[in-house]
C-alpha cells in the first residue's frame, strides 16, 4: 500500500496479552495482539462476542492493565504508568464515547461537553467548541439536561464531549448499541465527518457490520487474535467476513 | 414473600449496617438508662431497708436544724425539749428513746478547704447510754466526745484526710469556726455515710447549741418494747409531744417507705430526663432508617416491579418491606439491649467509684428488655412505613424499563404547602406564647416549637435547593469541577439531602437553643451583678445559711473594709401579700449598691422609706409617695411610704428597707449576704483579710464580683457540657446518617463515577467531590439547626424574662460559628469511608452496562 509510509500511528499495541484469572479459570482475552491505529483514521474493531474486542479497547485506553506486551498512545507507553499518570493521560489525550451515553444527569449538555476540560482546569477553545457543537447540531439544546434529551441527542452530547478537548484519539464502545437505526446512522456519519473534516482519530468497537462500514478500516478479532482487516469496507463485505467466523465456529 | 424479605436483609447487610448501628445506639441508650437507674435505685433502697430498724417512732421538729428558713422566724414553732424526751422515755410502750440534733457541719481539711460536697457533711450528737456507748456509732478508736472541745469523726473521712485521735480539726456548723480535738473515730451504717458523706459527732450540749438551742432536739427516736406495735407507740407518743404544725410523728415503717419513695422519685426523674435524650436519639434514627429504606427500594425498583409482574399484590410488597424493617429493628434492638446493659454496668461502676452509690448487683428487669426491644422494633418499622408504601406503588411495568432509577420525582407542591402551613402556624403560636410571657406562655411556645421543627423538616427539600445552589459560585471558584459536581449532587435528590441534613438539624437545634439560653442567662446575671453592685465583695455562707451576726461584726472590722451592709431577708406583709424585704444599711447603701432608680431617690432609705422593684410596684399599683400598711415578722404593725422604684433585680430582692427601720420589728436576722467595700478594691490581700477575719471558716464564701459571675457561668457551662454529652448520641446517629447516605449515593452513582474517572477525574478529585457533598449537606443541616435553635432560644428567653430580670437574647457568635464549623468537620469525617470507596471504584466494572 502506497499510503502506509505516510500514515503515523496514534496508538499502537505490540504483542499485547491480557489474561484474566488463574489456574482452571484462566482466560486469555488477548493473545499477543499487535495492531496500529493510524492518525486521522476511523478504525472499527469487529469480532464475535468474546473475541476480546472490548478488552483490546480498554487496554488501549488505559482503563485496564495489560498482562504483557505494550500499548502506547502517541509516544506514551501505558504499561507501567501509575493511576495518576493514566488519569491525566485519559483526561488530556483520550476521548470516550460509551454505549450507555454516560452523561452526568446533574449537568447541562454544555457542561457535560466541557467536563473533561473543567476537570483539567483548562479553558475550552471557544472557536473549536463552537465548531464541534455546530457539527453535532446541538446549538439549541445546550442548556438542557440529559433527561430532557433523546437518546440520539444524548449520544451526540457524548460525542461532542469526546471531541471538545481535541484528544489524540477517541475510543467509542458500541456507540450505536442503544440507539434506533436512524439516530445510529446520524452518530456514525457524525463520527466519520469528524475524522474527515476535523482530522480526529477514532477507534470504534462494534458488532454491527453497518456501523463498521462507516469506518476507513476494519480490524477483525477472534479468540483474542487479529485475524483479518479490511480497508474502506462496505457493510456487505464486513458481513461476509463475519459470516466466515460463524461458519468456522460451526465447523470447528 | 417473607423468604425474599429475609434474603433481602441478608444480601444488603452492608447497606443496612448503618441503620442497624443507629437502632443499636438508640436502644442501647434506652436500655442503659433503664438498667442504670433501676440498679441505682435498687441499691439505694436495699441500703435503706435497715436504717430504721431501731426506730419505731420518730418525732421531728421540722423547724429545727437545716430546714430552718427565713420564714420560720415568723411561725410559732414549738421545740422538742429534754422534758419531751423524758416523757417519751417514760411511756409504757417505750423501750428506749434518743434525742438527736443534727445538721450541716463543714469540716476543714488541713489546708482550710471544705471537705466533701456541700450537702453531704453532717454533724450530730453523741448520745451514750448508761454503758457509755452509743449503739448507733460504735467507736473504732478512741472514745466519744464528752466536752465542747471534742469531736468524733467517721473512720473513712478520717482516713481519707489523715485525721487521727488527738489531732486538732477545724469545724464550722453555722457560725464561727471551732477548733476541736478528735476524741475518737467511729463506724456507722448511717445512710449518710453509706452514700459517701462525712459525719462528725459532738457532745449533745454542743450539738444543741450549734443546731437548735440548749436542751432542744431536732428529732426524738423511740424504740417500742416487744409487744407494742409501732402504731400503738405512735399514739402514746402523740399524747406527750407538743401540738404544733412543726412537730411531726412518723413510724419507722413510714420513714422507710418515705425514704424508698424519695429514692424512687429521684430515680424516676433522672430516668425521665435520660429517656428524653434517648428519645431524641431514636427520633434522629428515624430519619436515617427511613432514608435507608427509601434508597434500598429505589435501587430495587426493578426487582419489586418484577415481583408485582409475577403476581405479588401491593399488600404483599408492602408487607415484605415492613417485615424486612421488623427483622432489622428486632435484631438491632437485641444487640442494643446487650450494649445497653453494658453501658448501665459501666455507668454504675463509674458512679459507684466515687462512693456515692452503695454497691449492689445490676438490675435488669424483664420490662427493661421488653421496652428496649419493642421501642427499637417499632421505631424501625414506623420509619420504614412510608418507604414500604412507596414500594407497593411501584408499577409492574417498571420491570421492563431500562432505567436504573425512576426519574420522575413526585412534585413537592403538596409537601411544601403542608410545610409552609406548619411552619407559619408554629411561628405564630410561638410568638403568641412569647407575648403572653411567663408560665402561661410555656405551652404555646413548646407546641409552636414542635410545629416549627416539623414544618421546617417538611420544607427542608424546598429550602435545600436555593440555599445549597447559592454556594455554587464559591464552590466552583474554590474547588473547581469537584465543587460544582458536589453541589449538584447535593441538590439532585432534595428529599434525601433533606432527610440527611434534618437528622443533624435536630441535634444542632437543641444544642444551639441551650447554648443561646445559657449565654443569655449568664449575660443577664453578669449585668445584674456588675450594674447593681459597687461592693467589692459579697460574703455569704455555704448551703444558703444566713450569716451569723457575730460573723458580720468580724467582717466589719476586718482590715481594709471601708463600708459594709448586710442584706437581711425578712418576710414582711405588705398590704395583703407577704414579700421578702431586704434590710440594708442605709448609711453605706450608696457606696455598696447602686440601683438605677426609675423614680424616687436612694436617700428615701435613710428616712425609713421603702424601695420597691418595678414589677411589684406595677402589680400593687404603688408609686413614689404611696403608703402601704405593713405587718412585721414579730407581729408589730405599721405603715410605710414608697420612696423609690428600681428595676427588678434578683440580687436585691423585690423590696428594700433600711436595717434601722426594720430594727425592733424582727425576731432574728437572716443575713443572706454581707456586701463589703474594701480599700483598694478586690485584691487578694483584701480577700485574705476577710477570710482571716472569719477565722478561716470553711463555710464562708468570700466572692468578688468577678468570682460571683465566674461561679455562675461555670454552673451554666457545666450544665451545657452535660447536655452536650447527652445530645451527643443524637449527633452521632446523625453522622451515621450522613455516612449512610453518602455510601449509598456512591453505590448508586457507580456508573457516573466510573465515567468521571474514565474522562480524567483523578482519585483525589473523586474523593474531594464526595467530601464536599458531605460537607455541604452537613453544613446545611447544622446551619438550619443554628437558625431554628436561635429562634427557639429567643422564644424561651421571652418566657424566662419574667423570672430573671433583664434577660435578653444574646447570640454567642463565636460558639454558633463553631457549631457550623463542627458541622463541616462532621461532614468531612462522615465522608472519609464513602469517599475512599468512591475513589477505589473499578472503572471498568462501573462503566460496563449491565
Image (cartoon, rainbow, N blue to C red):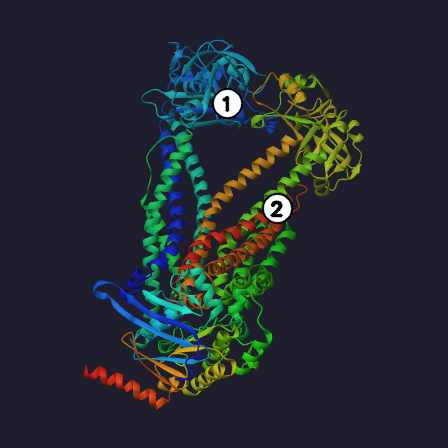
Horizontal relation, residue B349 to residue B682: left or right:
left
| Quadrant housing residue A56 | bottom left
* Local secondary structure at mark 2: helix
Along the line of sight, the residue nearer the viewer: A77 or B81: A77
Q: Are marks 1 and 2 on the same chain?
A: yes
- Pointer 1 local density, CA inside 10 Å: few below 14, some 14–19, many at least 20: some
- The residue pinned by badge 1 equals B115
| Quadrant housing residue B349 | top left
At 45% across and 77% down in the image, what residue appears? Answer: A39
Classify the position of the N terminus of chain A by image quarter. bottom left
| Quadrant housing residue B463 | bottom right
- Return the disc, 1 or 2, that comes first in the chain's sequence: 1
Residue B841, x across and y down, in percent:
39, 62
Q: Which mark is residue B814?
A: 2
Subunit ID for the residue under disc 1: B
At 24% across and 63% down in the image, what residue appears? Answer: A22
Horizontal relation, residue B469 to residue B807: left or right:
left
- Pointer 2 local density, CA inside 10 Å: few below 14, some 14–19, many at least 20: few
Classify the position of the C terminus of chain A by image quarter. bottom left
Q: Relative to B213, is B533 above or below? A: below
Along the line of sight, the residue nearer the viewer: B99 or B249: B99
Residue B266, x across and y down, in percent:
45, 37
Residue B776, x across and y down, in percent:
53, 58
Q: Does residue A99 appear in this view?
A: no
Along the line of sight, the residue nearer the viewer: B142 or B93: B142
Q: Relative to A142, is B601 above or below? A: above
Viewer-nearest of discs 1 and 2: 2
Subunit ID for the residue under disc 2: B
* Local secondary structure at mark 1: loop
Amino acid at each position: 500500500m502506497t499510503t502506509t509510509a505516510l500514515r503515523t500511528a496514534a496508538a499502537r499495541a505490540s504483542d499485547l496479552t491480557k489474561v484474566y484469572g488463574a489456574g482452571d479459570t484462566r482466560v486469555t482475552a488477548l493473545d499477543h495482539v499487535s495492531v496500529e491505529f493510524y492518525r486521522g483514521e476511523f478504525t472499527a474493531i469487529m469480532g464475535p462476542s468474546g473475541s476480546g474486542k472490548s478488552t483490546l479497547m480498554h487496554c488501549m485506553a488505559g482503563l485496564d492493565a495489560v498482562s504483557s506486551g505494550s500499548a502506547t498512545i502517541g509516544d506514551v507507553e501505558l504499561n507501567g504508568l501509575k493511576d495518576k499518570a493514566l488519569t491525566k493521560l485519559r483526561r488530556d489525550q483520550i476521548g470516550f464515547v460509551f454505549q450507555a451515553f454516560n452523561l452526568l444527569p446533574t449537568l447541562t449538555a454544555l457542561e457535560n461537553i466541557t467536563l473533561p476540560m473543567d476537570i483539567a482546569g483548562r479553558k475550552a477553545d471557544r472557536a473549536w467548541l463552537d465548531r464541534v457543537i455546530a457539527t453535532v447540531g446541538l446549538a439549541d439544546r445546550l442548556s438542557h439536561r440529559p433527561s430532557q434529551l433523546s437518546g440520539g441527542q444524548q449520544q451526540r452530547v457524548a460525542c461532542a464531549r469526546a471531541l471538545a478537548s481535541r484528544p489524540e484519539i477517541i475510543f467509542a464502545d458500541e456507540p450505536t448499541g442503544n440507539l434506533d437505526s436512524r439516530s445510529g446512522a446520524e452518530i456514525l456519519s457524525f463520527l466519520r465527518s469528524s475524522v474527515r473534516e476535523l482530522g480526529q482519530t477514532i477507534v470504534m468497537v462494534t458488532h454491527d457490520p453497518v456501523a463498521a462500514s462507516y469506518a476507513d478500516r476494519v480490524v477483525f478479532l477472534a479468540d483474542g487474535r487479529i485475524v483479518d482487516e479490511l480497508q474502506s469496507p462496505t457493510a456487505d463485505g464486513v458481513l461476509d467476513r463475519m459470516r466466515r467466523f460463524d461458519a468456522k465456529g460451526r465447523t470447528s | 414473600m417473607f423468604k425474599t424479605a429475609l434474603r433481602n436483609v441478608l444480601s444488603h447487610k452492608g447497606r443496612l449496617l448503618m441503620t442497624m448501628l443507629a437502632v443499636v445506639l438508640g436502644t442501647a441508650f434506652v436500655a442503659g438508662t433503664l438498667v442504670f437507674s433501676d440498679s441505682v435505685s435498687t441499691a439505694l433502697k436495699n441500703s435503706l431497708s435497715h436504717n430504721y430498724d431501731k426506730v419505731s417512732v420518730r418525732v421531728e421538729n421540722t423547724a429545727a436544724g437545716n430546714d430552718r428558713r427565713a420564714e420560720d422566724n415568723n411561725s410559732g414553732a414549738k421545740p422538742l425539749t429534754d422534758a419531751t424526751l423524758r416523757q417519751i422515755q417514760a411511756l409504757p410502750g417505750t423501750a428506749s428513746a434518743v434525742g438527736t440534733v443534727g445538721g450541716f457541719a463543714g469540716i476543714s481539711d488541713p489546708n482550710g478547704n471544705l471537705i466533701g460536697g456541700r450537702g453531704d457533711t453532717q454533724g450530730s450528737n453523741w448520745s451514750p447510754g448508761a454503758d457509755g456507748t452509743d449503739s448507733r456509732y460504735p467507736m473504732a478508736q478512741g472514745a466519744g466526745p464528752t466536752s465542747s472541745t471534742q469531736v468524733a469523726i467517721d473512720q473513712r473521712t478520717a482516713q481519707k484526710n489523715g485525721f487521727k485521735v488527738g489531732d486538732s480539726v477545724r469545724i464550722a456548723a453555722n457560725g464561727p469556726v471551732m477548733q476541736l480535738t478528735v476524741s475518737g473515730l467511729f463506724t456507722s451504717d448511717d445512710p449518710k455515710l453509706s452514700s459517701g458523706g462525712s459525719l462528725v459527732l459532738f457532745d449533745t450540749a454542743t450539738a444543741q447549741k450549734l443546731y437548735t438551742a440548749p436542751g432542744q432536739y431536732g428529732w426524738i427516736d423511740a424504740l417500742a418494747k416487744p409487744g407494742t406495735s409501732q402504731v400503738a407507740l405512735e399514739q402514746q407518743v402523740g399524747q406527750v409531744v407538743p401540738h404544733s404544725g412543726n412537730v411531726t410523728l412518723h413510724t419507722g415503717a413510714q420513714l422507710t417507705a418515705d425514704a424508698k419513695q424519695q429514692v424512687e422519685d429521684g430515680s424516676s426523674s433522672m430516668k425521665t430526663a435520660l429517656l428524653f435524650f434517648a428519645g431524641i436519639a431514636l427520633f434522629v434514627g428515624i430519619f436515617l432508617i427511613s432514608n435507608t429504606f427509601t434508597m434500598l427500594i429505589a435501587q430495587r425498583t426493578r426487582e419489586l416491579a418484577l415481583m408485582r409482574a409475577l403476581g405479588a399484590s401491593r399488600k404483599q410488597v408492602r408487607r415484605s418491606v415492613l417485615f424486612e424493617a421488623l427483622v432489622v429493628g428486632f435484631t438491632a434492638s437485641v444487640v442494643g439491649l446487650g450494649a445497653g446493659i453494658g453501658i448501665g454496668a459501666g455507668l454504675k461502676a463509674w458512679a459507684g467509684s466515687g462512693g456515692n452509690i452503695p454497691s449492689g448487683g445490676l438490675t435488669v428487669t424483664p420490662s427493661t428488655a421488653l421496652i428496649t426491644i419493642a421501642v427499637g422494633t417499632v421505631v424501625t418499622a414506623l420509619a420504614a412505613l412510608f418507604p414500604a408504601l412507596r414500594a407497593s406503588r411501584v408499577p409492574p411495568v417498571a420491570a421492563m424499563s431500562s432505567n436504573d432509577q425512576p426519574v420522575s420525582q413526585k412534585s413537592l407542591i403538596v409537601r411544601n404547602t403542608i410545610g409552609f402551613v406548619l411552619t407559619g402556624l408554629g411561628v405564630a403560636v410561638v410568638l403568641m406564647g412569647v407575648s403572653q410571657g411567663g408560665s402561661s406562655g410555656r405551652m404555646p411556645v413548646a407546641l409552636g416549637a414542635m410545629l416549627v421543627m416539623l414544618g421546617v423538616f417538611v420544607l427542608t427539600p424546598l429550602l435545600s435547593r436555593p440555599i445549597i445552589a447559592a454556594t455554587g459560585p464559591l464552590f466552583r471558584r474554590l474547588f473547581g469541577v469537584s465543587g460544582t459536581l458536589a453541589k449538584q449532587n447535593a441538590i439532585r435528590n432534595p428529599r434525601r439531602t433533606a432527610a440527611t441534613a434534618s437528622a443533624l438539624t435536630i441535634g444542632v437545634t437543641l444544642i444551639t437553643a441551650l447554648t443561646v439560653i445559657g449565654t443569655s442567662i449568664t449575660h443577664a446575671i453578669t449585668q445584674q451583678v456588675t450594674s447593681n453592685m459597687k461592693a467589692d465583695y459579697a460574703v455569704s455562707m455555704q448551703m444558703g445559711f444566713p450569716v451569723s451576726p457575730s460573723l458580720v461584726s468580724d467582717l466589719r472590722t476586718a482590715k481594709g473594709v471601708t463600708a459594709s451592709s448586710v442584706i437581711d431577708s425578712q418576710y414582711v406583709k405588705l398590704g395583703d401579700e407577704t414579700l421578702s424585704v431586704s434590710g440594708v444599711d442605709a448609711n453605706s447603701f450608696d457606696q455598696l449598691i447602686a440601683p438605677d432608680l426609675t423614680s424616687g431617690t436612694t436617700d428615701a432609705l435613710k428616712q425609713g422609706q421603702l424601695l420597691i422593684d418595678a414589677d411589684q410596684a406595677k402589680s400593687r399599683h404603688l408609686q413614689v409617695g404611696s403608703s402601704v400598711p405593713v405587718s412585721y415578722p414579730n407581729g408589730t404593725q405599721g405603715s410605710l411610704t414608697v420612696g423609690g422604684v428600681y428595676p427588678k433585680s434578683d440580687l436585691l430582692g423585690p423590696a428594700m428597707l433600711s436595717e434601722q427601720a426594720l430594727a425592733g420589728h424582727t425576731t432574728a436576722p437572716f443575713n443572706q449576704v454581707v456586701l463589703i467595700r474594701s480599700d483598694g478594691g478586690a485584691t487578694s490581700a483584701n480577700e485574705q483579710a476577710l477570710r482571716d477575719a472569719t477565722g478561716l471558716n470553711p463555710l464562708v464564701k468570700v466572692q468578688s464580683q468577678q468570682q460571683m459571675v465566674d461561679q455562675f457561668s461555670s454552673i451554666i457551662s457545666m450544665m451545657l457540657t452535660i447536655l452536650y454529652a447527652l445530645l451527643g448520641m443524637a449527633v452521632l446517629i446523625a453522622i451515621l446518617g450522613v455516612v449512610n447516605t453518602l455510601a449509598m449515593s456512591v453505590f448508586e452513582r457507580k456508573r457516573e463515577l466510573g465515567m468521571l474517572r474514565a474522562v480524567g477525574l483523578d482519585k483525589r478529585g473523586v474523593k474531594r467531590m464526595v467530601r464536599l457533598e458531605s460537607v455541604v449537606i452537613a453544613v446545611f443541616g447544622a446551619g438550619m439547626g443554628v437558625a431554628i435553635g436561635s429562634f427557639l432560644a429567643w422564644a424561651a428567653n421571652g418566657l424566662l424574662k419574667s423570672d430573671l430580670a433583664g434577660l435578653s437574647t444574646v447570640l454567642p457568635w463565636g460558639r454558633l460559628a463553631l457549631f457550623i464549623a463542627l458541622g463541616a468537620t462532621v461532614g468531612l469525617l462522615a465522608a472519609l469511608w464513602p469517599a475512599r470507596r468512591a475513589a477505589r471504584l473499578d472503572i471498568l466494572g462501573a462503566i460496563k452496562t449491565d
